[in-house]
Image: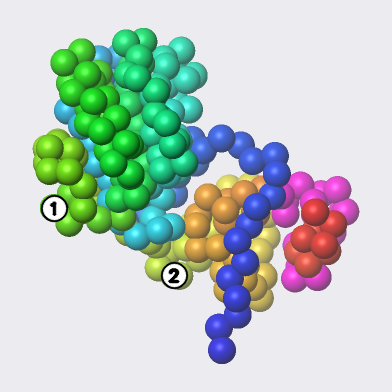
Amino acid sequence: MAMKQLPLDIGLARPPSLASFLAGPNEAAWRHLQLWAGSPTRSPVPTYLWGASGSGKTHLLRAVEESLREQGARTGWLDPSVEEPPEFDDRWAVVLMDDVQHYSAVQQHAAFNWFVNAQSLQRGLVAAGLLPPADLRLREDLRTRLGWGHVFELHVLSEPERRAVLRQAADARGVFLGDDVMDFILHRFSRDLGSLMQLLEHLDAYALQAQRAITIPLIKSMLENE
């Protein structure tokens, strides 16, 4: 019987960054966004990311937001939790839209308005959803615009890929993870790589503080003391 996967919600998280994204099979989308977000003349052609939960869509959108913030640029953000979206702001360099498949009629109206304004002012737009554009149950004028530019399917990393990435990240930090510890982490925690990297960061700090090697009892101790 599979053990219940525990989501990891530990405080003091660093904001997502493009550098910390573990691309695996999603390298094409990651490289595209790296080049695009880092360019002084960002193309106004929209980008749409789609894929299953845990494939890294929100991480990439937040990482783009953080990259632009570091450059001093303002962004507009829309997700289903924004019940009353603001009017488009001319100062926005880029518009970011997450979980578009869950947008209400009001949010779809705002998203379309943002899209039209972004295009007319030659501003960038990156959106993400669970489904490819053709399968989105959204108003037609919004749905077709989401599929107009660059479209990338994101894939959840397989366990061997997550294991390899976690091992690589641990080695880069000079942290030794035994096979038993790797198995415990991969089977007990969220499949989301951002959470796994956060866990590794906290484990490294906790092990240094406790002056102990990273073992399963140490992990349990850390979680109990959170």
Q: Position of residue 126 (x, y in %)?
A: 29, 34
Q: Quadrant of residue 46?
A: top left
- Give residue 139's position: percent from left, percent from top: 17, 43
- Who comes first in sequence, dot 1 or dot 2? 1
- The N terminus is located in which quarter? bottom right
Which amino acid, mark 1?
A: Ala
| Front position in the image: 72 or 177 | 72
Position of the C terminus by quadrant: bottom right
Type of amino acid at the residue the image marks with label 2: Pro
Measured along the vertical axis of the image, is residue 125 above or below residue 16? above
Q: How far separated are the C-alphas under marks 1 and 2?
A: 31 Å
Crowding around mark 1 (Cα neighbors within 10 Å: few <14, some 14 to 19, many 20+) is: few
Q: Which residue is mark 1?
A: 134
For the record, the magenta segment spans 202-218
Verify whether residue 36 appears in magenta: no
Quarter of the view holding residue 44: top left
Q: How is the image coloured?
A: rainbow
Residue 225 percent across, percent down from the top left? 85, 57
Per the image, label 2 sits on a secondary structure element best described as helix
* Residue annotated with mark 2: 160
Viewed as shown, does residue 35 lie left or right of 71? left
* Residue at image point 12% right, 43% down: 140
Tell me the mark number nearer the camera, choosing from 1 and 2: 1
Q: Is residue 93 visible?
A: yes
Marks 1/2 in contact by CB < 8 Å: the verdict is no
Left or right of 135, for residue 223: right
Say which of 206 and 122 sits in front.
122
Circle 1 — which element?
helix
Q: Position of residue 142 (x, y in %)?
A: 18, 38
State the residue at coordinates (25%, 33%).
109
The residue drawn where x is 56% and y is 35% is 15
Q: Nearer the viewer, residue 82 or 93?
A: 82
